[in-house]
Image (cartoon, rainbow, N blue to C red):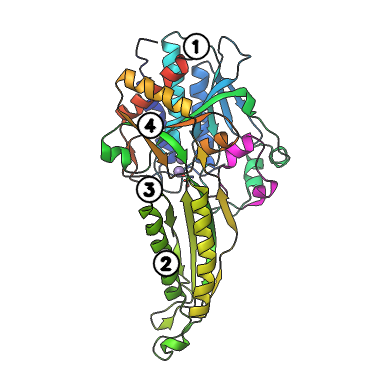
């Protein structure tokens, strides 16, 4: 393909603006999974797909698949796409850039009069953000028939209603999801490519518009952990008699931070985050030794051995602090996700296209989790194209420059068009 396939800018900007119209939740945007915002986003993308003469399909979990017929429908398809739900008060680009980018890439093929050899499916996944239902990759796992039935009973953090309830309200088929009905079969997918904002500072700092992802971090997490101590008089209880939950947590966090620094000094990568940390507002007070701290713990790495090392250390550390401080940790339910390796051939094909198109790019790992990890771990050749973005992500200030988005869309379009091998 010699001519440069330009992204359909009007379509992209119209869809981002359309999303914003019904997602604004100052500060930022909110589209809860199986909520009104996500459903309206699915409707918006479906209409855009129909206008591009794509064929819509919806699976039992409500994932949507919009397909451009290729010359040979018997061939395994290209699949592109992402999710359209957001974290509460997040940004408008996390996930949505991958769906709109997929549609824009298909639109550029249409405009160039290209009928690709393979069909191309734009996937719109449900419920990627696990801040709502405490489980990762709900939509994409359900699409492969991999969602454990008990996930359907998990309550959504804002409504308290179960995933099953929310699916039923939308006329979807939770029983089929629980029974493992699979809409996607790995053998029928030639490759999966997800456009996504980087959500970190690397590309912006390096002044490079596009990132070629080498791997996606996995995780282990405790979302509802508690450290129980003993409430007491802040003056009358001397040090040897204290069971201070905040000081115990300080020991835990300080020690985990030291281990993290050690791991990074060895040239390995991990992230350890305590995103929620609070004493009980109905019990705490200025003159009270805190008897309870509730917290969550999110540990991630691309390297399973690193995850195991941190988890083993955590188990030992909890016991040591309990003995030292006379407190008790209840970590609660453990959830997690498996690291994923991206397809080297797809990585190299995209690097070659980017070089030929004069699009600056660099390879990097993804600390954030993405639906692409599900595809890769199902054996589908998978790849992520990161788009440089500003102000990080999972916050209302998330930004992305449209010229960087268009570069990534052009790169994706050339990969899809150039598939005559
Ligand atoms: O948590 C994650 O990494 C993703 O944004 N769900
Ligand atoms: Mn995302
Ligand atoms: Mn996200």
Q: CA distance from mark 1 to mark 4?
A: 35 Å
Residue 318 shown in magenta:
no
Residue beneath disc 2:
255
Where is 3 relative to 81, above or below? above
At 51% from the left and 53% from the top, the residue drawn is: 307
Q: Position of residue 1 (x, y in %)?
A: 40, 10
Label 4 vs 3, first from the N-terminus: 4
Give the residue pinned by disc 4.
17
Distance in Å between CA atoms under marks 1 and 3: 41 Å
Residue marked by disc 1: 420
Which of pointers 1 and 3 lies earlier in the amino acid sequence?
3
Q: CA distance from mark 2 to mark 4?
A: 45 Å
Instruction: Say whether disc 2 or disc 3 marks the residue closer to the N-terminus.
Output: 2
The 10 Å Cα crowd at callout 1, few under 14, some 14 to 19, many 20 or more, is few
Q: Is the C-beta separation of discs 2 and 4 under 8 Å?
A: no
Q: Determine the secondary structure under disc 2.
A: helix
Q: Is residue 156 above or below residue 372?
A: below
Name the residue rendered at 47%, 51% in the picture: 300
Question: Can residue 397 be seen by looking at this rendering?
Answer: yes
Q: Which x, y percent locates residue 238?
A: 42, 89
In the depicted structure, whether residue 72 falls above or below residue 372: above
Q: What residue is at 71 percent from the left and 42 percent from the top? A: 178
Start-end of magenta stretch: 131-154
Pointer 2 or 1: first along the chain = 2
Image vertical order of residue 333 relative to residue 56, above or below: below
């Amino acid at each position: 393909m010699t001519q440069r396939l330009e992204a359909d800018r009007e379509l992209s900007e119209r869809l981002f603006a359309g999303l914003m119209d019904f997602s604004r939740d100052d500060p930022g945007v909110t589209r809860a999974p199986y909520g009104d915002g996500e459903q309206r986003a699915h409707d918006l993308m479906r209409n855009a797909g129909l206008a591009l003469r794509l064929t819509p399909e919806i699976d039992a979990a409500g994932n949507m698949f919009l397909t451009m017929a290729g010359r040979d429908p018997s061939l395994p398809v290209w699949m592109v796409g992402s999710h359209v739900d957001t974290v509460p008060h997040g940004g408008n680009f996390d996930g949505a850039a991958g769906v709109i980018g997929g549609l824009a890439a298909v639109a550029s093929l249409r405009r160039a009069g290209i009928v690709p050899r393979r069909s191309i499916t734009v996937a719109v996944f449900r419920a990627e953000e696990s801040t709502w239902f405490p489980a990762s990759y709900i939509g994409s796992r359900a699409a492969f028939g991999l969602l454990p039935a008990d996930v359907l009973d998990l309550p959504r953090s804002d409504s308290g209603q179960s995933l099953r309830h929310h699916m039923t309200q939308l006329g979807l088929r939770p029983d089929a999801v629980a029974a493992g009905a699979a809409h996607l079969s790995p053998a029928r997918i030639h490759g999966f490519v997800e456009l996504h904002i980087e959500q970190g500072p690397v590309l912006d700092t390096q002044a490079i518009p596009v990132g070629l992802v080498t791997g996606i971090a996995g995780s282990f997490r405790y979302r509802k952990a508690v450290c129980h101590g003993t409430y007491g008089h802040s003056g009358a209880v001397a040090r040897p008699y204290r069971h201070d939950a905040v000081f115990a947590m300080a020991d835990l966090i300080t020690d985990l931070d030291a281990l993290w620094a050690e791991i990074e000094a060895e040239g390995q990568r991990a992230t350890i985050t305590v995103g929620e940390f609070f004493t009980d507002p109905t019990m705490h007070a200025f003159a009270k030794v805190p008897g309870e701290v509730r917290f969550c713990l999110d540990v991630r790495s691309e390297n399973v051995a690193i995850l195991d090392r941190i988890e083993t250390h955590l188990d030992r550390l909890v016991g040591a602090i309990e003995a030292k401080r006379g407190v008790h940790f209840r970590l609660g339910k453990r959830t997690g996700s498996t690291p994923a390796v991206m397809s080297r051939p797809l990585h190299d094909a995209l690097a070659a296209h980017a070089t030929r198109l004069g699009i600056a790019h660099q390879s990097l790992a993804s600390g954030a989790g993405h639906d692409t990890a599900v595809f890769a771990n199902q054996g589908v050749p998978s790849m992520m194209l990161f788009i440089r973005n500003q102000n990080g992500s999972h916050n209302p200030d998330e930004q992305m420059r449209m010229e960087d988005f268009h570069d990534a869309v052009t790169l994706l379009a050339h990969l899809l068009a150039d598939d005559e091998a």
